[in-house]
Amino acid sequence: MDQVVLSEPIGTIGYLDPEIGKTKGVTCKSDIYAFGVVLFEILCGRRAYISNDANRLLAPLVMEHYENETLPDIIHPALKNQMSKNQISLSSLRKYSKTAYSCLKEDRAHRPHMLSIADELQKAFEKALNFKPRPENFVSPFLYFVFSLGLLT
């Protein structure tokens, strides 16, 4: 069972679990929410919070696009291009975005645990690159994926 630590809501705008304001409590699932935001930052190529933007907060924006099945409209163009060049499958993108979206669920009880997230991301990355890490030369699939797309150099 997840422990709840009661405290005043503090955190960085854009990453803060909306449940904290309601319950005044923080759990490990609060970190899951923030991680989901980071996953979407990578996909969309934008910050979690932009002060002078109509869509200031990334989380509600991606949730709306995910639910309306228009997420490709907000994926960063350079990433879309890289995905196309490397022939990354739509099924991989769907798995990645579904996993990221599950982290943003309003009800904490419906958010996955980190081991489950890592498992799902590994599956998405293996699909994307037809990459099966071997125990003797294990590379984090997440880092391999990010490097292969040129997001980190």
Image (cartoon, grey):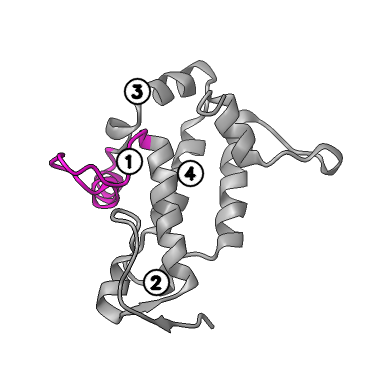
Q: CA distance from mark 4 to mark 2?
A: 19 Å
Question: What secondary structure is marked by label 2?
Answer: helix
Quarter of the image for residue 30 reads bottom left
Query: Dot 1 surroundings within 10 Å: few (below 14), some, or many (20 or more)?
Result: some
| Residue type at tag 3 | Pro
Q: CA distance from mark 1 to mark 2?
A: 23 Å
- How far from the left and from the top, in percent, is residue 9? 30, 72
| Residue type at tag 2 | Arg
- Which numbered dot is residue 11? none
- How far from the left and from the top, in percent, is residue 92? 51, 37
Lower sequence index among marks 4 and 2 = 4
Query: Dot 3 surroundings within 10 Å: few (below 14), some, or many (20 or more)?
Result: some
Is 93 part of what is drawn in magenta?
no
- Which numbered dot is residue 47? 1
| Residue type at tag 1 | Arg
Whether residues under marks 3 and 1 lie with C-beta atoms below 8 angstroms apart, the answer is: no
* Residue marked by disc 3: 77
Lower sequence index among marks 1 and 4 = 1
Who's the residue at 59% across and 25% down the image?
148
**In which quadrant will I find the C terminus?**
top right
* Residue marked by disc 2: 108
Whether residues under marks 4 and 2 lie with C-beta atoms below 8 angstroms apart, the answer is: no
The total number of labels drawn is: 4
- The relative height of residue 80 versus residue 74 in the rendered view (above or below) is above
* Residue marked by disc 4: 96
Nearer to me, 78 or 97: 78
Which residues lie in the magenta part?
A: 44-70
| Residue type at tag 4 | Tyr
Lower sequence index among marks 3 and 1 = 1
